[in-house]
Structures are given as C-alpha cells and as structure tokens.
Image (cartoon, rainbow, N blue to C red):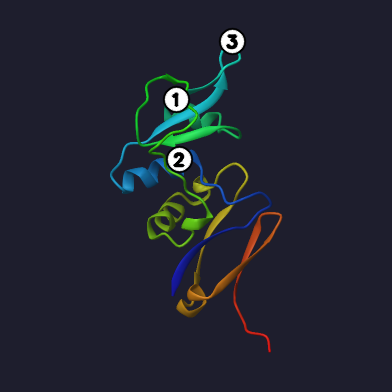
Amino acid sequence: MKKVILNKCYGCFNVSPKGYNLYAKKINKNLYFYRGVFDELKNHIYIKEDLDKFIKNEPTWLYVYSFDDYGNKVSRSTFENSLILDESLRFDPILVEVVEELGDEASGRFSELRVVEIPEDVAEDYMIDNYDGIETLHKRVELY
C-alpha cells in the first residue's frame, strides 16, 4: 500500500505554518516566516515573524516560507530559496509523516488534509476529482 494526502473539505490543498515548520525540521533546515504587508508609504514589503505569531494570524494573502534569513523587513518580491508544500507533494513520504504526526494541525486554514492508503497500482495511474476543493482519488480506467 502507498500513502497519499488528500484534501477532504471545501477549499484547497494547504499546509499550515506548523506543518511547514515540522517539514523543515525533518529535512534539517531552518525556516523563516515572512508576511506580505504594506508599509507607511504603501510600499509592499515582507516582515519576518516568529512561528507563534505567524500561526496566530495565519496568512491568507502574501506570505513566504524561506530557508534564507533576509532580516526583519525586506522589500523583495521574490525569495530564491523558499519552501512550497502543495498538491504536487501529496505522495512525499516526509509530508505524509507531517500530516500523520500533526493530524488536524497540519491543515491550513482552508483545508482538511488526510492521509489515505491506496494500492500501489492505483498510485502509478491515478486521477483526482476535485469538487470545490474536496478531493477524491480514483484509478484510471480505459474506456473502449
């Protein structure tokens, strides 16, 4: 059997800040949390926050999980070395571990991530139906 992560609620596949943090620890990297805001001159900047503050006000707009520390305030719009945990990693064994360990706390604000086990042959040839964010995995079948 193979493990896969699916989103099981309306919304999208989204990992929480706590999930990102645990993932980074499991790959032995430090992670820095940056939130996009506007400064007093209405310039778009990113400010670094600690994990607790980032979790308390979980971002829904611009944010970056960076392996590099750019300081407390940065005006860059691109981060060269950032971590993105999305549906392309649904079979990643480390992300599967994170979701299993954290349970509901691994899910971002608009998700309900669940680990399910599927047969190996389904993992090689599958499709995911997505209805407003709720995902269902199916083995592809050939129609004649």
Q: What is the C-alpha distance between the residues marked 2 and 3?
A: 32 Å
Q: Position of residue 85 (x, y in %)?
A: 47, 48
| Front one among 34 and 3 | 34
| Front one among 42 and 16 | 42
The residue that mark 2 highlights is 18
Numbered marks: total: 3
Give the secondary structure at mark 1. strand
Give the secondary structure at mark 2. helix
Which of the marked residues, 2 or 3, is nearer the chain's N terminus? 2
Kindly identify which numbered label has been placed on residue 108.
none
Kindly identify which numbered label has been placed on residue 49.
1
Residue 68 left/right relative to 90: left
Q: Position of residue 59 (x, y in %)?
A: 57, 33
Q: Residue at x 55, y 47 (%)?
A: 14
Q: Residue at x 30, y 41 (%)?
A: 29
Q: What is the C-alpha distance between the residues marked 1 and 3?
A: 21 Å
**Kind of residue sitting beneath label 3:** Leu
**Kind of residue sitting beneath label 2:** Lys
- In the rendered image, the quadrant that contains the N terminus is bottom left
Give the secondary structure at mark 3. loop
**Kind of residue sitting beneath label 1:** Glu
Q: Quadrant of residue 50?
A: top left
The residue that mark 3 highlights is 41
| Tags 2 and 1 touching, CB below 8 Å | no
Residue 12 left/right relative to 78: right
- In the rendered image, the quadrant that contains the C terminus is bottom right
Which of the marked residues, 2 or 1, is nearer the chain's N terminus? 2
- Give the class, few, some or many, for how many residues have Cα within 10 Å of label 2's Cα (few <14, many ≥20): some
Position of residue 129 relative to residue 53, above or below, is below
